[in-house]
Amino acid sequence: MLAVRPLGVLGLGQNYGTVATESVWHFVRSMSVSQWLLVLHPIMMTLVKRRRGPEEAFSVDYSAMVQIVYTLACAAWLSCRFVSRFRELWAAARRPPLRWVLLYGVLAIISTAWSDVPMYTLFRSFQYLVFFGLIVDTTWHQRSVDRMAKLLAIYGLILIVFFQIADLSVNAFAMRERIGPHVSPTSGVVFFLGLALRGPGWRALVYLSLLSVAIGQSAGTNVSMAAGLFVLALIGRDQKLRLASLTILMLFSLLALVRSEFAGSVLFPQKGTQAIYTMSGRIPVWQWFLWDIFPKRPWVGYAFGTGESVSRLENVRGLQMTHMHNPLISALANLGSIGGLVYLVTMFSTASVAIHITNSRWKGPVCAAITLITLNSQQGVSISSTVSTAWITSCLLLALLSTTPQEARSGQESLLRRKDQTGCFRRA
């Protein structure tokens, strides 16, 4: 039976309801300062974002100054939290898979020593650890998979409102080009996790996130969504969800056999054959990096932040990518083989925790969300890059997994099995 606890002890709000059935409004009112700092970050980025040319990659302008001030404000709040709750937060940071994200952040700070632009590397790595600390503080506040999923849903709602809807009102085409790939992965994660949420208003976010994925028209997210549906149909415990996922996949497979061109346009919107085979020019840039750039600094890379920007400063077959669009390539560029190894260990730790999920309510949705974000990041951004909306989504999802030991100790609903006094496994 699901144990519940007052919301007031989890955040700054009062006792508005229970963890299981609280509404969207009740959850928002109980959010802590660290959670608000995470949620407000994309709004701040929306207000100050602008396109930068290659020559402005490391310049400090108004946009950069706002980010610096915001990061320092977050660091000031986080320092107060660590002074009062150091032991608890340190224990939360050392739980898998977050411990490997912490190690990557420490290595990022150290890489300042060999960076060609040390101040840029120092700030980006400092920002990395500050936002990691906010997420760790969030896991300490929530102590519940249910509430971590709700925080991800609120974060996805902010992205949809301030990125997609705002840009859609101005120029739909521009939205698909600039914003769709950034919002769609988070919307896909919210869709899968929202299938297991209970309480007024949460199901509406599921429908909104699905609409966001459709409007975003991101080929990577569409393919990752199909993979997530396959995982949900394969290991989900809810028979209705499994049947619905299987039906969608079978109908789409049938459509692909009958109308292959139409099915291709759904999975790969506005993509020609050349763009599909080269992943919109990403593969040539990856080949250039692995063959020409990586061998020059194979062990420690080109320092955090500056490493993944090497393609921005070079004209590779007429292409200049702002980052590597692949988490493993980004890790190799930033921190060399050591960083690549830490990233792979992080993914292995994530898979290890996910495989051992036995809770019937969360197993399918969580594994589907992890599948989506992992596959989609292979042509985007993940935890090996600098802080971004995709980075925060990925870290929040890893933090959701890390809450499982804490839940087991507190007697709440757990994703993992626990041993009883006889040594036999039983469900929490």
Image: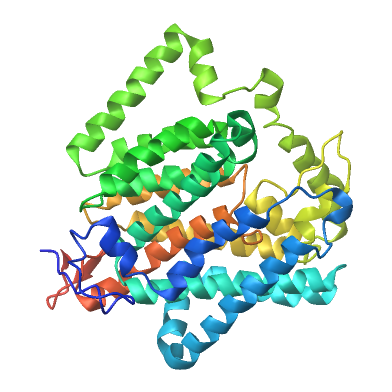
Q: Residue at x 69, y 25 (%)?
A: 275
Figure check: 256 above or below 15: above
Q: Residue at x 18, y 37 (%)?
A: 239
Q: Position of residue 177 (x, y in %)?
A: 64, 34
Viewer-proximal residue among 199 and 247: 199
Q: Is residue 400 left or right of residue 277?
A: left
Q: Is residue 224 above or below residue 116?
A: above
Residue 342 image offset from top left, x and y in percent: 61, 65
Taking depth in this image into account, of 274 and 216 the one nearest to the observer is: 216
- Left or right of 334 on screen, residue 390: left
Q: Quadrant of the C terminus?
A: bottom left
Percent coordinates x, y for residue 329 in the rendering: 70, 51
The residue sitting at 55% across, 46% down in the picture is 163
Residue furthest bottom as drawn: 83
Toward which corner of the image does residue 308 lie, by quadrant? bottom right
Which quarter of the rendered picture does the N terminus lie within?
bottom left
Image coloring type: rainbow
Q: Is residue 415 visible?
A: no
